Image: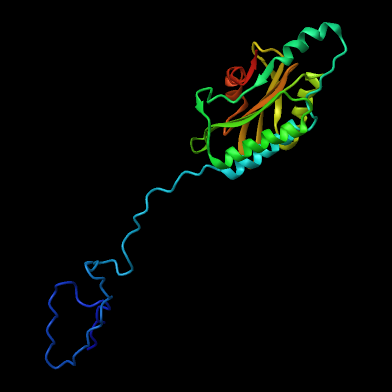
Amino acid sequence: MSQPPANPFGPPHDSPTPPQQQGQPAVPQQPGPPQQPGWPQQQGQPYGGPHLAGPPPKKSNVGKIILIALAVLLVLCLGGAAAIWFTVKDEVGDVVDATKTRVVAPATLAGRAKNTDPQLQTVADQMVASMKSEVKNETSTVGAFYGDPTKQDLLMIAAVSGVMADPKKELDEAVTGLSSELSVTNMTAVDAGPLGGDARCGDGKAEGVPLGVCIWADRGSVGLTVMYFKTAEQTKAEFVTIRGQIEQRS
C-alpha cells in the first residue's frame, strides 16, 4: 500500500517524529526551509508572511495639473494684453485708476493655504516669467496654486495688470483660448463684483480633470481662476471673493 507523501517542510515545530511502522522502509526526512537566527519558524506560511504595507498614498495628479497650468499660460499670453493708449477723453479717469491696479498672491486665498509643492511652485514661477516676457507694459503679474490636490480642492490663479486698451477684446480672446486649450464650454456672463469690468465662467475639462473656470477683464487687469475637480457653478460662487483678494487698487 502506498504511503502519503512526506511533508516537504518536515514535521510541525516541536512535534515528535512519527515512529517508523514495522515492515516498511524508512522514508528520509526532507529538510525544512532554513531558519534565520533569532526568528521563529512561521507555520502555515511557507512562502513568507503577510505584507505589512499601509494604505496606498493618495494621488496628487501633479503631472496633469502642470499640463493644465501650461495650457492656461498660453491663453493669457496670446494677445500680449497690456497697452498704454486710449482715444476718448472720458476714458482718462479710467486709465488713471487702471495705472493704480496691481495683482498679488496672498498667503491664503478664499480660505485655502498657498500650495508650496516644489513642482507646482516651479510652474507658477514659469507662468510669471512668461507673462512678464510676453505681455506689453505690464505693471504686475501673478501665478500661484492654493489648496490640496489630494483632497480634490485645488485652485490656480493667473493674472496680469496694466492699462488695457480694449478690455472686452482681451476677454473675448481669452475665452476663445480657453475653449481651445481647456475645452471650456458654456461661458456665461457673471457678476464681476465691486471691481467692475466684465467676467465670465464656464465648465472645462483637460487631462480627464473637470475644471471650473472664471475669467475677468477690466481697464487695469485681466486674469482667471481655475478650480480643479470643480464645476463652473462651484467656481462662480467664490469668484468675487477670490478676485477681490487678487486684484488691488492703491
In percent of the image, x 62 and y 20: which residue is there?
A: 243
From this viewpoint, is residue 85 visible?
yes
* Figure coloring: rainbow
Which quadrant is the N terminus positioned in? Answer: bottom left
From the viewer's perspective, is 121 left or right of 141? Answer: left
From this viewpoint, is residue 182 visible?
no
- Residue 50 lies in quadrant: bottom left
Image height check: is 218 above or below 67? above
Image height check: is 208 above or below 106? below
Image height check: is 176 above or below 126? above
Residue furthest toward the top?
90
In the rendering, at what x and y percent does residue 146 appear? Answer: 55, 30
Which quadrant is the C terminus positioned in? Answer: top right
In the rendering, at what x and y percent does residue 153 appear? Answer: 52, 32
In percent of the image, x 75 and y 11: which residue is there?
A: 96
From the viewer's perspective, is 42 left or right of 17? Answer: right
- Residue 37 lies in quadrant: bottom left
Q: Pick whichever, 4 or 223, lies toward us.
A: 223
In percent of the image, x 67 and y 26: which residue is there?
A: 224
Q: Pick whichever, 91 or 232, lies toward us.
A: 91
